[in-house]
Image (cartoon, rainbow, N blue to C red):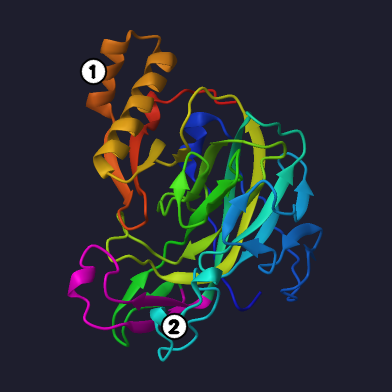
């Protein structure tokens, strides 16, 4: 696997939730990228991918609950921008934001809550940051399209020949098939999808409600780095692979939740960021009411004091906010 930069992290914050996010890495791997099995671990190639999440997509693999497996992923451009001569308007958008999957999980039924653990993220040796007029918060100031190939070496990404940033790999797209129809992987929602949330990184987990038996989980759109808001419309878009495991958990809620070192973040997406914050905060208040056996008014007061409103992304068709509840206010037992 000499073409990957391994970024493995055990998130110590998970201990607050007794989720036992131990990392179980394979010590023997082969270099064949098209192999479905690597040293007894299931490996799914990026050719098994789609730009839409749907219950009618062919299941590419079935895993046992808690079984670790690897998804190989394209960058969001499916490798089409392989030099700085290739610009964003040149890209075939039918291939955009492909997610590898879906993977079915034995024992998961429609309506169940599942915890998708991100055990490992490995990224390629280079990523891309492509700009074009209209992209991002200041897209009106971009006069012409340009592409920047970003080399990745020794844990750093080189934005210019002399300027580098530390990488912090994250998963941009992680979701389940929707109950009805299909949803483009550009869209976030209750199914997960294009959440572009930088806390979706090694050691964290995403709680989603399965809409179909098996869950039908897909993932892709890795970023070597991205800031909150993804304000420029792009992270360091990069190919790579994700090691996941999935199991059932008990949860009372409606929206996706990220479990990470700082606590738990309720994710909500809407066309208007204020509506996303409102919906996420409403769910956070309801969870605090249940966890701490409070009346609604007191739960509202408490959540207003201890939680934080954060922005995951402002550049997708639906914007994503997160309401983070610190770990000391989260349940000690979860699932």
Viewport quadrant of the C terminus = top right
> Rounded to the nearest whole Å, what is the CA distance between mark 1 and mark 2?
51 Å
Residue 77 position in % (x across, y down): 50, 73
Farthest bottom residue? 85
Residue at 28%, 32% (x, y): give it: 278
Pointer 2: what residue?
A: 90
For residue 110, which quarter of the picture?
top right
- Span highlighted in magenta in the image: 125-154
Residue 159 — which label? none
Number of numbered callouts drawn: 2
For residue 307, which quarter of the picture?
top left
Residue at 38%, 75% (x, y): give it: 129
Examine the rendered structure and indicate whether residue 308 appears above or below residue 37: above
Pointer 1: what residue?
A: 301
Residue at 32%, 60% (x, y): give it: 230
Question: Which of the two discs, 1 and 2, sits closer to the camera?
Answer: 2
Residue 28 position in % (x across, y down): 76, 66
Residue 61 position in % (x across, y down): 77, 53
Viewport quadrant of the N terminus = bottom right
Labels 1 & 2 near each other (Cβ < 8 A): no
Check disc 1: other Cα within 10 Å, few if <14, some if 14-19, many if 20+. Answer: few
Examine the rendered structure and indicate whether residue 233 appears above or below residue 228: below
């Amino acid at each position: 696997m000499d073409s990957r930069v391994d970024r493995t992290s055990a998130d110590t914050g998970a201990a607050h939730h007794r989720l036992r996010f131990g990392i179980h890495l394979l010590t023997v791997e082969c270099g064949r990228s098209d192999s479905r099995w690597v040293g007894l671990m299931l490996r799914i190639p990026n050719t098994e991918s789609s730009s839409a999440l749907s219950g009618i997509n062919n299941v590419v693999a079935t895993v046992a609950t808690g079984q670790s497996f690897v998804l190989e992923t394209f960058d969001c451009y499916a490798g089409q921008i392989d030099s700085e001569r290739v610009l964003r308007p040149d890209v075939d958008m039918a291939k955009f934001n492909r997610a590898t999957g879906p993977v079915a999980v034995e024992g998961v039924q429609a309506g169940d809550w599942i915890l998708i653990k991100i055990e490992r993220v490995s990224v390629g040796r280079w990523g891309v940051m492509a700009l074009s007029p209209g992209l991002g918060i200041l897209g009106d100031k971009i006069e012409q399209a340009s592409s920047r190939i970003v080399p990745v070496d020794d844990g750093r990404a080189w934005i210019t020949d002399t300027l580098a940033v530390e990488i912090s790999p994250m998963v941009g797209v992680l979701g389940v098939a929707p109950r009805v129809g299909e949803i483009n992987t550009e869209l976030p929602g209750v199914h997960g999808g294009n959440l572009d949330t930088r806390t979706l990184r090694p050691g964290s987990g995403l709680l989603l409600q399965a809409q179909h038996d098996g869950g039908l989980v897909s993932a892709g759109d890795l970023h070597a780095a991205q800031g909150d808001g993804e304000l420029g419309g792009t992270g360091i878009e990069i190919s790579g692979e994700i090691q996941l495991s999935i199991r059932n958990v008990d949860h009372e809620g409606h929206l996706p939740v990220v479990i990470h070192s700082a606590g738990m973040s309720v994710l909500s997406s809407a066309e208007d960021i204020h509506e996303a914050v409102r919906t996420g905060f409403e769910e956070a208040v309801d969870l605090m009411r249940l966890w701490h056996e409070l009346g609604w008014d007191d739960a509202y007061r408490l959540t207003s004091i201890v939680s934080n409103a954060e922005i995951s992304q402002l550049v997708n068709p639906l914007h994503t906010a997160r309401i983070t509840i610190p770990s000391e206010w989260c349940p000690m037992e979860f699932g």
